[in-house]
Amino acid sequence: MQQDYDFYDTEPLYGYSYYRLRQVDFNGDDELSETRTILIGGDPHPSDLLIYPNPSNGSIFIRSGVDQTVLLRLRNSVGQEIDVLVITD
């Protein structure tokens, strides 16, 4: 019996995202599809500082493409400084 479905990533990350599907049969057998790569927002410039997701539920990812030390001050939604990070390559 064929079943059709749709899925929309309503909060995709900037840059490259990787997707694949897992099919699980009624008997419990499963199979993974090939991985698909999607580029959101164009190719990130290598010197860009990427911080995501924003807003965050407590975990963030930081990527710096610069070859120097970066000082990053994290603030909450009311502007209070909650952390200071030093990122070095």
Image (tube, grey):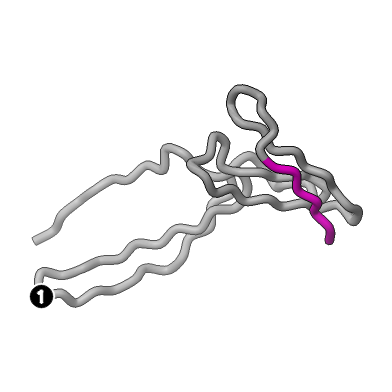
* Image-quadrant location for residue 72: top right
Q: Amino acid at mark 1?
A: Asn
Name the residue rendered at 8%, 61% in the picture. Answer: 1
Relative placement, left or right, of 82 versus 3 is: right
Name the residue rendered at 25%, 66% in the picture. Answer: 23
Q: Above or below — where is 29 with respect to 13?
A: below
Task: Give the structural element (helix, strand or loop) at label 1.
Answer: loop
Name the residue rendered at 34%, 71% in the picture. Answer: 32
From the image, which quarter does the C terminus lie in?
bottom right
Name the residue nearer the viewer: 33 or 61: 61
Q: Above or below — where is 36 with respect to 13?
A: below
Q: Residue under circle 1?
A: 27
Name the residue rendered at 15%, 54% in the picture. Answer: 3
Residue 25, percent from left and from top: 15, 70
Residue 31, percent from left and from top: 29, 74
Name the residue nearer the viewer: 1 or 10: 10
Report the number of numbered marks: 1
Residue 48, percent from left and from top: 78, 44
Name the residue nearer the viewer: 89 or 9: 89
Residue 87, percent from left and from top: 80, 54
Asked whether 85 falls inside the magenta stretch, the response is: yes
**Magenta segment:** 83-89
Q: Above or below — where is 84 with respect to 65?
A: above
Asked whether 74 falls inside the magenta stretch, the response is: no
Q: Main secondary structure of the magenta part?
A: strand
